[in-house]
Image (cartoon, helix red, strand yellow):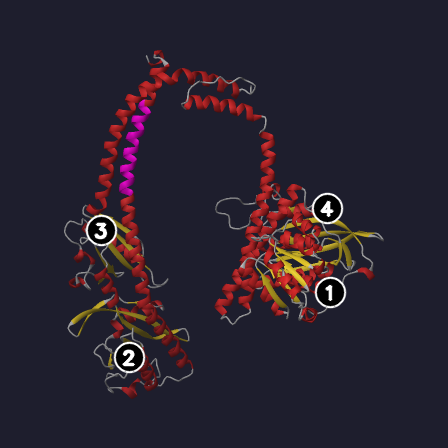
């Protein structure tokens, strides 16, 4: 029967059915979701309250714990050196008790004759000793004065038996104590005293838990009907709005109607084992959140009870509102839908046939125009527009690729500018007086910044390679010195690593070769860094061997081998792909953006080589490649062995104009310049720099020896300012150095074309920076 209906009625019935089912489903989902969200809110509230208590409880106990643990160590040490003088130990406890506001009592108890073997000498010397003379004094100040008494029958008490048997810290169940007409809750934290691997006694600190009760009195989790309580691991009440329940069993606090009595054993078991437990009764929603003090002490728990009526009120309102709105909407939609279907059926069929033709690849099809201003008309016009624009898709794709390159350049600049501030301020901070913990934090920031800079450089390198813009420099360099510096770098960076790092250099390796030292260093930085990342034990070996040599060139074989986790054949097949890694799962153990090896492959191929890899799971990995380099005559080799501090002496007194709009970056550069005795004047933009130069010329003051020019600045950028400086006769011969976060080769070429002496990038490489300044100073002289 349904098959024989017209398209109009088919659409009407189908859409109506979908609408009705959708609204009914939505009603059910919203209703259930509202209940779930209400319970989630209640759980979040309970968890937040529990976290507050956890911090308060740990704060209350931490001082007592540290003190007791310290005394335990002290008394073990005294025993080691036979310095266990009882009067001295009593004085230590008494004085400590007087100075520790948060501790109300100290207890120390030794096994018979375990302290000094002199129990018989102290027999009956009260109040600290009983007729046995055993050393077990209890010092307390609960009455206002510090008093001492002997603790009898300690061998039968859990607080003595448990630490003795298990040899670890123990926290007692809090217990009520009458003090000056009021009841307070106390807890004791006990540490065993071990000597020569033998238990000889305990040291205990007692604290008052008044603050926890004060918190319980103030916290009102959800209206007047809700409340919060704190429970010990055995189920005893530590804090409760009703003080009559203090010290009693949890079952006695359950009010009528909570429907939790049948679950009391489950609740206690969860508390004792440190697990969270949710009790959802007819009238209350209660969350028991565990509070774990340490790995060996039993947990407490915070119970937050919220009335179910409060939780369900909003959920019921939302559900009823959604049901009402759904019924009205279904009726209105059904009425309107009937008339809409009649008007849209015919144009839909026309467009359907047209879409089918286009889908078959006939893009020259004439798309009929539906003369209407509704969605159907818009759809027909959109079809026509799509066909007309389809032929331009390839052009747009090319433009998009160019836009990507521009984006890479811009994002590099925007990252490098603040990164220069981070790294520069970090280096300055390291030169100040900081404690060891702060220095550790600063060193970690420095490492993270270096990692981020490396990622930015990898992105730039990959973008250059992808666009075919990566170029290699060709200059003489000492390859042995390069590997010596890499050895120092990786050993310093991985001080705590158990791995053995070996550099095996062929004795026939020439002293100097022609090539791009920076790019070759980058290859081995990537490969050796990866080896450290994926190797947990064993060694890493860097090998360089001469495979052939002529009078003009040398062919070298390179390899980096490790004993790490290795790779499967499937992993090796995609190893050099950009933005890909051997392990791309969401839970992968090792980090990285997947660019390092892709960039490494591009550099090796630019050098005329081809990189390959051999590996076996769990048996290590070896990366190999070969390249040929021209040889350098000995007289033309580069050698610079003068210490940096002697070299930088040439910079003392040099006058510098620093043009930088970023305040933090200006401060960092100024610090670097002042550190070597240079005189610095700052300008915030190109126009400001030109004004300063003009004023200096009018005043006939000594000119600047050089200018450090940022490129991206407001008012006037560095390009325009440099052009005007170079065109002004008064400034002839004044060197201008670009100092910018734009690191692409195109930017460097543009700067040199303007007449700038060099192109220095941010974040600043201190050695390169000072080297350029020394060159400028030397050329002026």
Please give the residue where the numbered disc 1 appears in the rendered image: 780
- Between disc 1 and disc 2, whose residue precedes? 2
Q: Are marks 2 and 4 in contact (CB under 8 Å)?
A: no
Quadrant containing the C terminus is bottom right
Please give the residue where the numbered disc 4 appears in the rendered image: 609
The residues tagged by marks 1 and 3 sit, at their Cα atoms, a distance apart of: 80 Å
Neighbor class of circle 4 (other Cα within 10 Å; few <14, some 14-19, many 20+) is some
Relative depth, front residue between 588 and 72: 588
Tell me the element at label 4.
Answer: loop
The residues tagged by marks 3 and 2 sit, at their Cα atoms, a distance apart of: 47 Å
- Between disc 1 and disc 4, whose residue precedes? 4
Q: Nearer the viewer, mark 1 or mark 3?
A: 1
Residue 511 relative to residue 145: left or right: right
Please tell me the numbered disc located at residue 306. Answer: 3
Region of the chain picked out in magenta, as a range: 16-36
Please give the residue where the numbered disc 2 appears in the rendered image: 136
């Amino acid at each position: 029967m349904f098959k024989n209906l017209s398209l109009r009625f088919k659409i009407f019935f189908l859409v109506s059915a979908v609408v009705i089912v959708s609204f009914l489903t939505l009603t059910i989902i919203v209703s259930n979701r509202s209940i779930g969200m209400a319970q989630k809110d209640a759980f979040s509230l309970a968890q937040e309250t529990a976290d507050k208590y956890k911090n308060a409880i740990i704060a209350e106990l931490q001082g007592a714990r540290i003190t007791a643990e310290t005394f335990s160590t002290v008394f073990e040490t005294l025993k080691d050196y036979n310095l266990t003088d009882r009067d001295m130990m009593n004085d230590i406890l008494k004085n400590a008790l007087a100075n520790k506001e948060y501790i109300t009592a100290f207890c120390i108890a030794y096994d018979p004759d375990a302290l000094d073997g002199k129990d018989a000498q102290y027999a009956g010397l009260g109040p600290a000793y009983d007729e046995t003379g055993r050393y077990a004094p209890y010092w307390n100040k609960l009455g206002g004065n510090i008093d001492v008494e002997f603790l009898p029958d300690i061998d039968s008490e859990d607080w003595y038996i448990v630490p003795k048997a298990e040899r670890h810290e123990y926290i007692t169940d809090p217990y009520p104590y009458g003090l000056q007409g009021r009841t307070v809750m106390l807890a004791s934290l006990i540490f065993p005293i071990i000597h020569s691997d033998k238990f000889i006694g305990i040291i205990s600190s007692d604290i008052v838990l008044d603050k926890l009760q004060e918190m319980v009195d103030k916290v009102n989790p959800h209206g007047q009907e809700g409340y919060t309580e704190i429970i010990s691991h055995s189920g005893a009440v530590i804090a409760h709005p009703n003080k009559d329940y203090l010290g009693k069993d949890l079952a006695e606090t359950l009010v009528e109607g909570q429907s939790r009595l049948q679950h009391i054993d489950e609740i206690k078991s969860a508390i004792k084992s440190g697990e969270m437990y949710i009790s959802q009764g007819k009238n209350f929603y209660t969350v028991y959140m565990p509070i774990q003090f340490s790995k060996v002490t039993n947990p407490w728990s915070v119970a937050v009870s919220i009335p179910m009526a409060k939780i369900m009120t909003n959920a019921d309102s939302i559900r009823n509102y959604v049901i009402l709105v759904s019924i009205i909407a279904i009726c209105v939609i059904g009425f309107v839908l009937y008339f809409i279907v009649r008007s849209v059926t015919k144009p839909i069929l026309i467009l359907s046939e047209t879409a089918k033709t286009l889908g078959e690849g006939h893009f020259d099809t004439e798309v009929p125009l539906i003369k209407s201003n509704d969605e159907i008309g818009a759809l027909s016009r959109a079809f026509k527009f799509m066909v007309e624009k389809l032929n331009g898709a390839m052009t747009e794709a090319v433009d998009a690729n160019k836009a990507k390159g521009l984006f890479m350049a811009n994002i590099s600049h925007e990252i490098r500018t603040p990164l220069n501030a981070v790294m520069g301020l970090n280096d300055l901070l390291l030169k100040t007086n900081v404690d060891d913990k702060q220095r550790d934090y600063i060193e970690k920031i420095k490492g993270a910044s270096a990692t981020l800079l490396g990622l930015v450089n990898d992105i730039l390198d990959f973008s250059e390679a992808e666009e075919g813009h990566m170029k290699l420099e060709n200059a003489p360099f000492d390859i042995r010195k390069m590997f010596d510096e890499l050895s120092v770098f990786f050993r310093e960076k991985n001080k705590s690593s158990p791995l053995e790092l070996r550099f095996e250099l062929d004795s026939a390796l020439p002293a100097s070769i022609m090539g791009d030292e920076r790019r070759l260093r980058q290859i081995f930085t990537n490969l050796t860094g990866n080896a450290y990342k994926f190797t947990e034990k064993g060694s890493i070996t860097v090998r360089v061997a001469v495979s052939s040599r002529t009078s003009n060139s040398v062919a070298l074989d390179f390899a980096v081998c490790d004993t790490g986790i290795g790779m499967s054949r499937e992993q090796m097949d995609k190893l050099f792909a950009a933005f890909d890694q051997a392990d791309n799962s969401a839970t992968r153990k090792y980090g990285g953006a997947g660019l390092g090896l892709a960039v490494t492959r591009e550099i090796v191929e630019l050098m005329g080589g081809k990189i390959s890899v051999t590996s076996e799971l769990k048996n290590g990995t070896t990366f190999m490649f070969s390249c040929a380099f021209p040889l350098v005559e000995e007289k033309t080799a580069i050698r610079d062995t003068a210490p940096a501090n002697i070299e930088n002496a040439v910079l003392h007194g040099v006058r510098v104009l620093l043009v930088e709009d970023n305040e933090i970056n200006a401060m960092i550069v100024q610090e670097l310049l002042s550190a070597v005795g240079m005189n610095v004047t700052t300008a915030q933009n190109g126009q400001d720099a030109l004004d300063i130069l003009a004023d200096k010329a009018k005043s006939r003051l000594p000119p600047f020896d050089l200018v450090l020019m940022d490129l991206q600045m407001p008012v006037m950028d560095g390009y325009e300012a440099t052009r005007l400086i170079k065109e002004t006769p008064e400034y002839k011969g004044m060197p201008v150095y670009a100092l910018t976060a734009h690191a692409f080769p195109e930017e460097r070429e543009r700067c040199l074309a303007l007449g700038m002496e060099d192109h220095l990038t941010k974040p600043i490489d201190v050695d390169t920076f000072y080297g350029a300044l020394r060159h400028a100073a030397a050329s002026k002289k």
